[in-house]
Image: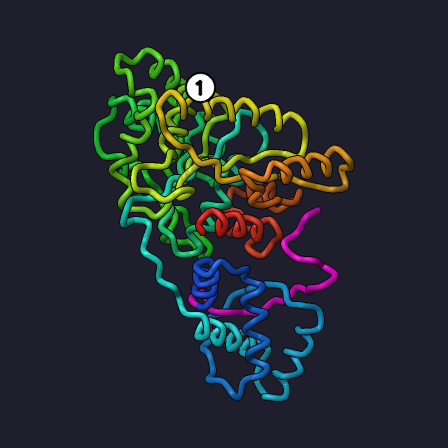
Amino acid sequence: MTAPYDPSDREKVVAKLPAELRKELKVRAAELGKDIQDAVTEGVEAWRKAKERPAVDTSGGTSFATYLPAGLYGKLKQDSKTRNISYNQAIAQSIRLWLDGNPSPRPQSPRATGARRIIFGNQKGGVGKTSVSAGVAQALAESGHRTLLIDFDPQGHLTKQLGYPLLDIDNASLAKHMLGEARGALNELLVPIKGGDFEEHLWLLPACKDAFLLDAKLATSRSVRIKETALEKALDPLEQDFDYIVVDCPPSLGYAMDTALYYCRTRENEEANTSGIVIPVLAEDSSADAYDMLYEQIQDLTEDLNVLIAMLGFVVNMYDSRKGYVATSSLDEWNNIGDPPVLAIVPELKDQREAVRVKKPLLVHAPYGDQAGVMRTAARRIST
C-alpha cells in the first residue's frame, strides 16, 4: 500500500496541542505547499539548535499526530528533559518556531475573482468520487479556505454519508434552481459541516432525489444553452462567498455532467488550472475504459462550445499493491499518462469505511490517518 511516509524512515509521534496552533500550522503548511510532517520536522530540528524559547500556552490541547524521521523523536524527548520542559511543550515550541520563521505569503484570495470551481467526475460508479471529493473539500477548508461542497448526485451518497437528510422532493433544491422552478435563495439550502479543524469553513449543499429528472428536463428545455449554463447560473450568487466550490458529480455522461463540465471551464481572465475536473479512478481496467468515455465527452464539449476544460489530475483510490500485477501495472499506466498527472494515491484502509458507517467526515473520524494525509496532499496540489 502507498502511504504518505516511509515507515522505515519515520515514526509516528503524538502530542496534545491547542486547536488554534494546529489550525495555524495546517493553514501555513498549505499556503507554502509543504507537508505538515516536513514542517514539524524542520521546526524540531531548528528548536534543538535554538536557545531557550518562550513558553507556548498548551492548555486545552487535544491529540495531534505526525511523523518524524526515525531517531528524532528520541532526541526531542531527551532535549525536553535537559531543558526541564514537557514533551508537549517542546513540540509546541518547535511548531511556533517554524511558524515564526515561515511567514504567510498572504496570496490574493481566490474570492477576488470568484470561487475556484473543482468538480469530481467519472462515468464509472464505485471509484470513490464521493469519498475523495468530500476528503479534499475538508482538507481545503481545514487550510482556511471557505469551501462549499455540493452533492450533485441524485443518489445522495455524500449527503447521507455526512449524516444529513436529503432535501424534500417537494421543496427547493439545486435542480429546481437550475430549471428556474424554485423560490427563495439557493444559499438558504446550505448547511454547515461541523467538527475538526475545518469548522466554520465548510458548508454542504445537500442532494435531492428530484435530480433524477434533471437530464430529461434539460433535454426538453426550449433554451438552446440552458443545458450547459444551468449549473453556472444557479451557483453564480454563491461564488463571491467562497474560495472553493467542490462538486461531487453523478456517475453518468448525461446533460447534468455537461453542465458540471461547463461550470469548471477556464473562464476569461482566469489562470490556467485554477478550476477544472479531478478524476477519481481505481487501479484496474474498467476505470481506464470509463476515463476514455469521459475524455471523449470533454473533448466534444470543448470543441462544440470553444472552451477550455482543465483536467487537473487523477486520484487513484483504494490502492493496495498486495492485489498484485493488475493493481501495480494499472497504477504504472495512470502515472505514465503524465498529463493529467496523478495527484495522489489513496491507500485501501478502513478509515473511510468507518467514517461512512458513523456518518462523520473523514478528517474528523481519523484526522491523522494515512487516508486523511493523502486528502491533504491532493488538496495542496489542487490549490497550488
Q: How is the image coloured?
A: rainbow
In this picture, which residue range is highlighted in magenta?
A: 1-20
Q: Percent from the top left, x then y, of residue 69? A: 67, 68
**249 or 262, nearer to the observer:** 262
Q: Quadrant of residue 341?
A: top right
Query: Which residue lies most toward the left here?
Result: 184
- Image point 32% across, 37% down: which residue? 267
Task: Residue under label 1, please give it.
Answer: 254
Q: Tag 1: residue type? A: Gly
- Image point 43% across, 59% down: which residue? 31
Magenta span includes 185: no
Task: Report crowding for label 1: few under 14, some 14 to 19, many 20 or more residues within 10 A (C-alpha).
Answer: some
Q: Quadrant of residue 176?
A: top left
Q: Is residue 93 above or below residue 160?
A: below
- Image point 29% across, 28% down: which residue? 172
Q: Is residue 144 above or below residue 269?
A: below
Q: Percent from the top left, x then y, of residue 213? A: 38, 17
**355 or 69, nearer to the observer:** 69
Q: Is residue 85 above or below residue 5?
A: below
Q: Percent from the top left, x then y, of residue 83? A: 59, 88
Q: Quadrant of residue 309?
A: top left
Q: Is residue 209 visible?
A: no
Magenta span includes 14: yes
Q: Percent from the top left, x then y, of residue 126? A: 59, 29
Judged from the image, the secondary structure of the residue bearing numbered disc 1 is loop
The reply, left or right, for residue 83 in relation to residue 238 is: right
Q: Is residue 161 visible?
A: yes
**253 or 201, nearer to the observer:** 253
- Image point 61% across, 53% down: which residue? 369
Q: Is residue 22 above or below residue 145?
A: below
Q: How many marks?
A: 1
